[in-house]
Image (cartoon, rainbow, N blue to C red):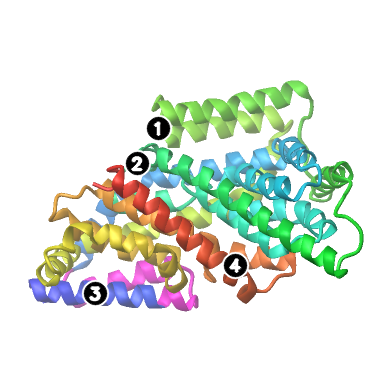
């Protein structure tokens, strides 16, 4: 069975079965990504020792990513807990001054700030309850609110601790921080494009509201007391802290230290002074010492964010089995050789770009894990025959897909956002999907013509 044809067939079966299980959503990703490749190995005639070697090889490439995820999620979670970003969001709400255009632009800025921790659930919990009263008071659409926050959060999903880069780094055996450094220019472009989309949606909303006022369907003006709404947001955040029993130090000095630590981490990541894993480990320990008085409070802070951190870490560790088997057994190589032999010569060098252009629709068909752990390895191996680097292949798929993160029914955070806003998936997708796809295509084309995908 360990022939080129046997390896190709088994590799495709492992990928198809794993993706199928992930799409159905009937099992935690850890289960199919561990058991399916293990069973495939035994069917091919490999033994337990071979399986252990495959896993060890895969494990060696993911450990630094696992450590980074655990402590990055905990670090930014602590900063959210203590309300470090609350004044920023409160100030942005006030800055909108009840102007429709400024509200949509402010929503984009708030979404970007709120998603610094890379957690979609946290982002929507911060933004939707804070901004929905403002949108209601101004007769603005809740679907515009959802779309802008989703686009802003998706752009911020390019940070190395958010998820996509960690998965991609695992596949191409490259530090997620290095991938981020490569993507920063396109991330900046994407942020500008999101602000442009927010402005266009604001202009459209302004015209819609004006028409409704002219027809008499809406009475009065859209003036609101934004200061009161901002105060309500802060009070709600403080109430959450009180009800959840958060015990942490407060004061101007503590706030300044937290800001300095957060900036130091970002500088470290951008400068390459420290790898992400030790940088976030050190930052997390400093945040625990600075913000919490006792060992018990520090333990509670860790427990609050352990589920999110360990959930992501578990997926990456399971990916070590999946990718270790596919890579070390030669399955991926054989699949890539088969694709190269059947693809038209003109298509092969641009396969990663083509898949990137289809990234948002693919997000409706596959889960994030299936996309990065099944599609990316095949694409990478295939375009490598045309001298395209792993970084170039990964960049194309990340740029094309990341904007679709929160237009996918496979995103639990999106369902949370819809629930918070009292919105329907169908109506949301009608507005958000075409915007996300156009933005994604624009970003992939910019990246391609600027030489980022080679």
Residue at 77 percent across and 47 percent down: it is 99
Residue at 13 percent across and 68 percent down: it is 344
> For the residues marked 3 and 1, what is the alpha-carbon distance in whole angstroms?
35 Å
Residues packed near mark 3 inside 10 Å, few (<14), some (14 to 19) or many (20 plus): some
Residues packed near mark 4 inside 10 Å, few (<14), some (14 to 19) or many (20 plus): some
- The stretch of residues the image draws in magenta is 21-46
Q: Which mark is residue 254?
A: none
Q: Earlier along the polypeptide chain: callout 1 or callout 4?
A: 1
Question: Is 336 rendered above or below residue 254?
Answer: below
Residue at 69 percent across and 38 percent down: it is 85
Q: Considering depth in this image, is 188 or 277 the residue closer to the camera? A: 188
Residue 76 visible in image: yes
Q: Earlier along the polypeptide chain: callout 3 or callout 2?
A: 3
On the image, the x and y values in percent for residue 159 come to 48, 43
Which residue is disc 1 drawn over? 275
Question: Which quadrant, please, contains the N terminus?
Answer: bottom left
Would you say 138 lies left or right of 261 here?
right
> In which quadrant of the rendered view does residue 91 lie?
top right
> For the residues marked 2 and 4, what is the alpha-carbon distance in whole angstroms?
35 Å
On the image, the x and y values in percent for residue 187 come to 46, 43
Q: Earlier along the polypeptide chain: callout 1 or callout 2?
A: 2
Q: Are marks 4 and 3 in contact (CB under 8 Å)?
A: no
Question: Which one is closest to the eye, mark 2 or mark 4?
Answer: 4
> For the residues marked 1 and 2, what is the alpha-carbon distance in whole angstroms?
8 Å
On the image, the x and y values in percent for residue 390 come to 25, 49
Which residue is disc 3 drawn over? 12
Residue 299 visible in image: no
Which residue is disc 2 drawn over? 175
Question: Is 74 rendered above or below residue 26?
Answer: above
């Amino acid at each position: 069975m360990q022939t080129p044809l046997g390896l190709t067939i088994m590799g495709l079966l492992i990928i198809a079965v794993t993706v199928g299980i992930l799409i159905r959503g009937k099992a935690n990703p850890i289960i199919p990504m561990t058991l399916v490749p293990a069973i495939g190995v035994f069917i091919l005639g490999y033994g337990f020792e071979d399986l252990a070697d495959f896993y060890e090889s895969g494990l060696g490439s993911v450990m630094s990513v696992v450590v980074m995820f655990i402590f990055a999620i905990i670090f930014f979670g602590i900063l959210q807990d203590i309300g470090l970003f609350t004044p920023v969001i409160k100030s942005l709400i006030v800055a909108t001054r009840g102007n429709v255009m400024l509200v949509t632009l402010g929503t984009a800025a708030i979404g970007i700030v709120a998603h610094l921790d890379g957690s979609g659930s946290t982002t929507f919990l911060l933004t939707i309850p804070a901004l929905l009263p403002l949108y209601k008071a101004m007769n603005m659409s809740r679907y515009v609110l959802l779309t802008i926050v989703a686009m802003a959060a998706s752009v911020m999903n390019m940070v190395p601790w958010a998820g996509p880069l960690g998965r991609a780094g695992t596949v191409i055996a490259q530090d997620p921080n290095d991938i981020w450094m490569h993507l920063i220019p396109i991330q900046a472009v994407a942020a500008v494009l999101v602000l442009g989309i927010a402005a266009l949606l604001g202009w459209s909303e302004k015209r819609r509201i004006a028409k409704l006022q002219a027809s008499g369907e809406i009475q009065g003006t859209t003036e609101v007391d934004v200061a009161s709404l901002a105060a309500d947001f802060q009070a709600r955040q403080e109430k959450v802290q009180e009800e959840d029993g958060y015990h942490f130090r407060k004061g101007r000095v503590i706030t300044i230290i937290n800001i300095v630590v957060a900036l130091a981490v970002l500088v470290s990541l951008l400068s390459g002074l420290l790898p992400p894993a030790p940088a976030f480990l050190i930052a997390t320990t400093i945040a625990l010492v600075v913000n919490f008085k006792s060992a018990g409070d520090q333990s509670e802070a860790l427990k609050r964010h352990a589920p999110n951190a360990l959930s992501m870490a578990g997926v990456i560790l399971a990916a070590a089995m999946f990718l270790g088997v596919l890579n070390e057994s030669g399955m991926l190589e054989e699949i890539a050789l088969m694709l190269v032999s059947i693809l038209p010569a003109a298509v092969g060098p641009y396969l990663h770009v083509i898949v990137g252009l289809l990234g948002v629709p693919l997000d409706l068909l596959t889960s994030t894990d299936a996309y990065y752990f099944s599609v990316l390895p095949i694409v990478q191996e295939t375009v490598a025959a045309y001298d395209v680097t792993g970084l170039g292949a990964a960049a194309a798929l990340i740029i094309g897909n990341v904007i679709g993160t929160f237009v996918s029914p496979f995103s639990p955070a999106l369902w949370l956002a819809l629930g918070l806003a009292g919105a329907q998936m169908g109506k949301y997708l009608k507005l958000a999907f075409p915007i996300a796809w156009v933005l994604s295509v624009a970003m992939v084309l910019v990246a391609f013509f600027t030489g980022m995908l080679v």
